[in-house]
Image (cartoon, rainbow, N blue to C red):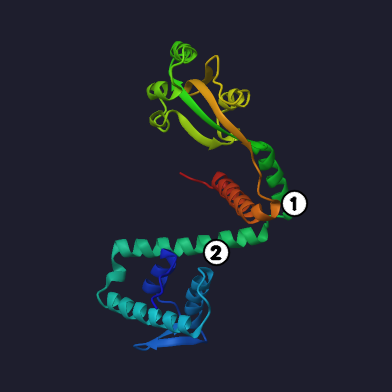
Amino acid sequence: MKIVPSHLALSLVAALVAIPALAQTVVTVNGTAIPQARADVMISEQKAQGAPDSEQLRNAVKEELVRREVLAQEARKKGLEKAGNVQAQVELARQAVLIRAYLQDYVKAHPVTDAEVKAEYEKIKAQLGDKEYKARHILVEKEEEAKAIIAKLDKGEKFEELAKQSKDPGSKDKGGDLGWANPAGFVKPFADGLVKLEKGKYTSTPIKSDFGYHVIKLEDSRPVKAPSLEEAKGQLKQRLEQMRVERHIAELRTKATIK
């Protein structure tokens, strides 16, 4: 069983930086004691990725540590740890491990509450509404172009054919098809125009947005059943934690003296 570390930082630090032996030693390689703490880190990472804690896992970790130490010792014999690019990588690895530890500590000290998760859930649920829509659109640069397209639609020309002149590269070759989507995913003028349409109808006047002028056709609509709070709780908590961390980083960045 080969252990594949999930973080480059831990790999580099373990392989290139000599860590003082602790009271407990997992193995000794050419007189160098490998601390149990190093093995514990690797075991924890493998367990976090779904590996069961077993004698096989512990033996595999031990073997990986031996392989790394043998290679690291050879690298030191060649003086590679003194190379500028290697020292830079080691320092980046140390920094990455330290940063991860700090952010984990910050999240632990500033936990997201159930009330915050529920409030975020209700906010997103309100934004999504209770319907999603299957629409097509044709995007052009000028209002006159959009009006000309509407006139052609009024005469019976096919929306799918006219969509080939659309500026939207993601939908022009699909007859303007945007698939099923929630109005919240569109810019407001587009969303407002879309929800007013009846099934099978298209906008009688061009809809202006920051992208240009749209001609929109509503293919269909259907009710949306949002996931329950319990189903979304884990993802929402992670999202709020990330947002909190980003705000904290921004605050630290603002306070820092940078020249």
3D distance between C-alphas at marks 1 and 2? 26 Å
Quadrant location of the C terminus in the rendered image: top left
- The three-letter code of the residue at mark 2 reads Ala
Q: Position of residue 141 (x, y in %)?
A: 43, 18
Q: Position of residue 124 (x, y in %)?
A: 66, 42
Q: Quadrant of residue 223?
A: top right
Reading the chain from its start, which is encountered first: label 1 or label 2? 2
Disc 1 designates what residue? 115
Neighbours of disc 1 within 10 Å: few (<14), some (14-19), many (20+): few
**Which one is nearer the viewer's eye here, 64 or 254?**
64
Instruction: Spot the residue most to the left.
Output: 78
Does residue 180 sit above or below 151 in this rendering?
below
Neighbours of disc 2 within 10 Å: few (<14), some (14-19), many (20+): few
Element at badge 1?
helix
Q: Quadrant of residue 28?
A: bottom left
Which of the labelled discs sits on residue 190, or is there none?
Answer: none
Residue 32 visible, this orientation: no
Residue 75 in the figure: left or right of residue 176? left
Disc 2 designates what residue? 101
Instruction: Spot the residue most to the right.
Output: 115
Q: Do callouts 1 and 2 mark residues in contact (Cβ within 8 Å)?
A: no
Q: Position of residue 13 (x, y in %)?
A: 41, 70
* Residue at horizontal 59 percent and vertical 36 percent from the top: 182
